[in-house]
Image (cartoon, helix red, strand yellow):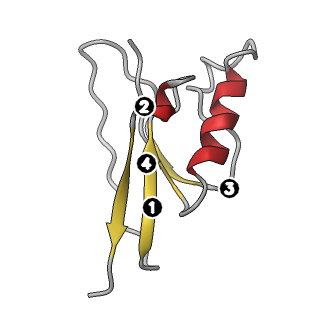
Amino acid sequence: MFHNLLVVRPGSLEEVGQLSDKLAAQPDGMAKNYIPDSKQILFATALVGPNGKAELKFDAPREPGSYPYLCSFPGHWRIMQGTLIVETP
């Protein structure tokens, strides 16, 4: 099973998830790692296959808030999601 990780802007989980589902019907969806073209995506890894690894290094957003993260492989985002909490120091 393939997976990836996207960190998105607050409030955009459903929008990005639905866009990734639409990539399943496009012939180049897999080549795009099922990462939709969206300004809501802050950070992302490529798809990783079984026994694969990915490393994602990023600076946390400066703006405090709840930043959703998800797997954008079609359909996965509905259960494979969480929240990165950014607080002021």
Picture quarter containing residue 88? Answer: bottom left
**Amino acid identity at mark 2:** Asn
* Mark 1 residue crowding within 10 angstroms, few (<14) / some (14–19) / many (20+): many
* Mark 4 residue crowding within 10 angstroms, few (<14) / some (14–19) / many (20+): many
Circle 4 — which element? Answer: strand
Q: Quadrant of the N terminus?
A: top left
Q: Which residue is mark 3?
A: 39
Q: Which residue is mark 2?
A: 4
Disc 1 to disc 3, C-alpha distance: 14 Å
Q: Residue at x 43, y 38 (%)?
A: 45
Q: Which residue is mark 1?
A: 67
Circle 1 — which element? Answer: strand
* Lower position in the chain sequence, tag 4 or tag 2: 2
Which callout, 4 or 2, points to the residue nearer the camera? Answer: 4
**Amino acid identity at mark 3:** Lys
Circle 2 — which element? Answer: loop
Q: Residue at x 67, y 17 (%)?
A: 24
Q: Which residue is mark 4?
A: 69
**Amino acid identity at mark 1:** Tyr
Q: Residue at x 38, y 22 (%)?
A: 48
